[in-house]
Image (tube, rainbow, N blue to C red):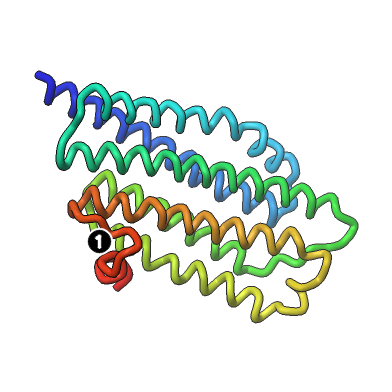
Amino acid sequence: MLTVVLEKRLKSLEDDVLGFSWETIGRVDKSVRSFLEEDTYLAREIIEKTDEINKESYKIEHGCLKVLGLHQPLAKDLRLGAALLRTSIELERINNLSAYIARYAIDAAESDRSCYKPPHIDFMSQTVQDMLKDAVGALLNEDIQLLKRSTRSYVNLQDFYNQMFSEYEEITHGGSQTSLILVGRNLLSMGHHIMGMADRVAYSIVGKQVVHHKLFHNMLMR
């Protein structure tokens, strides 16, 4: 009986994480779009809804801690609960970064100086969204191949960031391009958070700790 209750609660938490992840992906896309299109209305909407959206994270965290505390799951169930908790925390941080990007979009739109927006920003946004889809999909489907695809995409994210600065060195070092630099760095930080959840997802799937370990690179980055 207790096992059935535990499975139902974990399944409910998985559904919550899936819904929260799709909301987060949508906010990443909208925040970058607000910057590229200088849409201050959309940017303000993203900022205003941040606290409301992150309430879902608190709900998931509470649910995970309740499961871990009351049911004291073991082995696979314990790893899954821990992975769901870590994923929820990282999604909340990514949502906050989306709000920062929206703030930079407003600053750029209201600035007297024009801000050039190279295509790399859009490429980075799409890469972050794909990484997030693959990472959450890997967790919910216990698919190590999806997780590998997510972590490998981080290399592409770094490449887009570095290419933007190497190809547009004069532009990105201008005083009017502060918002562009900050948007790029926030997208890169989103990639960091997705990589942060990847080690917990890998542990949930294969049952081995891989964070800060050669196994992480052998398993996920090749």
Q: Nearer the viewer, residue 66 or 126?
A: 66
Between 15 and 100, the one lying in front of the other is 100
Q: Is residue 107 left or right of residue 122?
A: right
State the residue at coordinates (79%, 54%). Answer: 108
Q: Amino acid at mark 1?
A: Gln
Q: Quadrant of the C terminus?
A: bottom left
- State whether residue 214 is above or below residue 207: below
* Residue on which disc 1 sits: 145
Q: Residue 212 placed where, x, y %?
A: 35, 62
Q: Please determine whether, in this image, residue 98 is positioned above or below residue 1.
A: below
* Neighbours of disc 1 within 10 Å: few (<14), some (14-19), many (20+): few
- When asked about the image quadrant of residue 27, the answer is top right
User: Residue 7 occupies which quadrant of the picture?
Assistant: top left
Q: Which part of the image, by quadrant, shows the N terminus?
A: top left
Lateral position of residue 84 relative to residue 106, left or right: left
From the top left corner, tell me how far across and down residue 199 is, in percent: 32, 55
Q: Position of residue 22 (x, y in %)?
A: 44, 41
